[in-house]
Image (cartoon, rainbow, N blue to C red):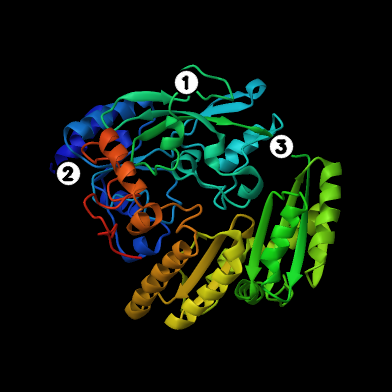
Amino acid sequence: MQNEQLVKDLQAILGSAKVLSEKLDLLSYSYDSSFMARNNRFVPDVVITPTSTEEVSKVMKYAFNNNISVTPRGAGSGETCGSLAIQGGIVMDLATWDTIEEIDAENMQVQMRPGVIHAELNKRLAEYGLFFPPDPGSSQMCTVGGMVANNSSGLRAVKYGTTEQYVLGLEVVLPNGEVIVTGGVNCRAIKNVSGLNLTKLFVGSEGTLGIITKIRLRLWPKPKARGILMAVFNDLEQAPQAVLDVYKGGILPSGIEILDSSAIKAVNEYKPDINLPNAEAILLYELDGNPASVKWEGEEVSRIVGLLAANVEWSTDPQRMSELWQGRAVTATAAARVREDGSRIFAGEDISIPLNKVTESLKKIKEIGKKYGIGVVNYGHIGDGNVHTAPVINPEDPEEVKLGAALADEIHLLAIAMGGVTTGEHGVGAVRSQYARKEHGAALDVMQSIKRTLDPKNIMNPGKLLPEEGNKHGTSTSSGS
């Protein structure tokens, strides 16, 4: 179908104001933060901004009948090309559909449309003494719909888990335009074991099975107290052990973050005033709960970690907590500044490793970096083994671009070899589908069967999450890392 006719048809369904087709508009939807997107442009044929379930359903029926690809998109803050139209077609921008429809405080849940910003949701919930715990680093910009589609998490996943644990039900428009509600049509219960769990099927499906148009989330009471502990280690081996020892002590912090020597160096060069101690590793523990329990847990974690660390500092003072956390807060930015002609690339950046393999993995990542002559800054959520690696290359140098892709490939394969996975929170998208066979084995065939059943024409976000069918080796046909 010619783009001109496609635009006219969509304007007839949605009205002209919700259909974008100017070149500059389309270009602005052609990239995200990923290394693949940096090296390619995936320009859609048209962008639409529906704001009702009826509009989404009409568009999907039209796309289904005309075999047109549809790629749902939130804020576009992803790092895996997940919301880019790599095969063209329609990008469905849901970010403007941002209504919080009901805060049901008595039943500890909220219903909203997909475009609600994470930080805005928690700001509204705070009025009721409630909160939605998963906390991605992009809180100020990412949408809750995108979080559900990617099963996002972040630093609090250690204690509170990932997004899937809070999704009670969804309204979904299937590829053929049919509208379903998962988790019970009129359900307001928190507990539900009735039927197959279709809600979990759609959470983390990355827009490959349907369009999420309404979300029902479970909420938690907002903790009344918080504290931060910083521990400094002269031996990297001691840091993961200090994490396990705290767990063995019966304490579950809300977050445990690590900066290794590469991250400490990057932070101190970027912001000398922060002046982190020169060490092999720094751990930051966040504890939350009621004031009495936070006080006791802070003292106990200090005692346990102090047996291994060179130095420990614990604080519940807001100003001091902010100072202790400052190094972690700027690490991602600092990583991008470690060389004047370089830039941090998002490739192989969020592997998830078993806790007892974190040290070995960090050492091997350093070796891989040396092999390719690429500096890699390591940090992340050590509490659940989610390691962030930040390779820094000159993206204008074609040779370094090739080396960066090869380095990312080795990091992904390392994660699988270590008994981990290629992504702990950023998702698969187009950049990691090539590893699906190695990660999932025969279960991948079941995933593809589900995809075929719900999306027989493969119009929903094609080229993402799963490798092309018939490719038994799971090798991606897509370019980039």
Question: In the figure, 175 relative to 423: above or below?
Answer: above
| Residue 186 picture location, percent across and down | 49, 16
Dot 2, crowdedness within 10 Å: few (<14), some or many (≥20)? few
Which residue is tagged 2?
3
| Residue 18 picture location, percent across and down | 32, 35
Q: Of marks 1 and 3, which one's residue comes earlier in the chain? A: 1
**Secondary structure under the numbered disc 1 in the rendered image:** loop
119 sits to left or right of 471? right
Closer to us: 380 or 339: 380
Mark 1–mark 2 CB contact (< 8 Å): no
Which residue is tagged 1?
184
Please say whether residue 63 is visible from this viewpoint: yes
Residue found 54% across the figure and 69% down from its top: 361
Three-letter code, disc 2: Asn
Three-letter code, disc 3: Lys
282 sits to left or right of 178? right
Q: Of marks 1 and 2, which one's residue comes earlier in the chain? A: 2
**Secondary structure under the numbered disc 2 in the rendered image:** helix
Residue 356 falls in image quadrant: bottom right
Three-letter code, disc 1: Gly
46 sits to left or right of 281? left
Closer to us: 107 or 317: 107
Which residue is tagged 3?
222
- Marks 3 and 2, how far apart at CA: 49 Å
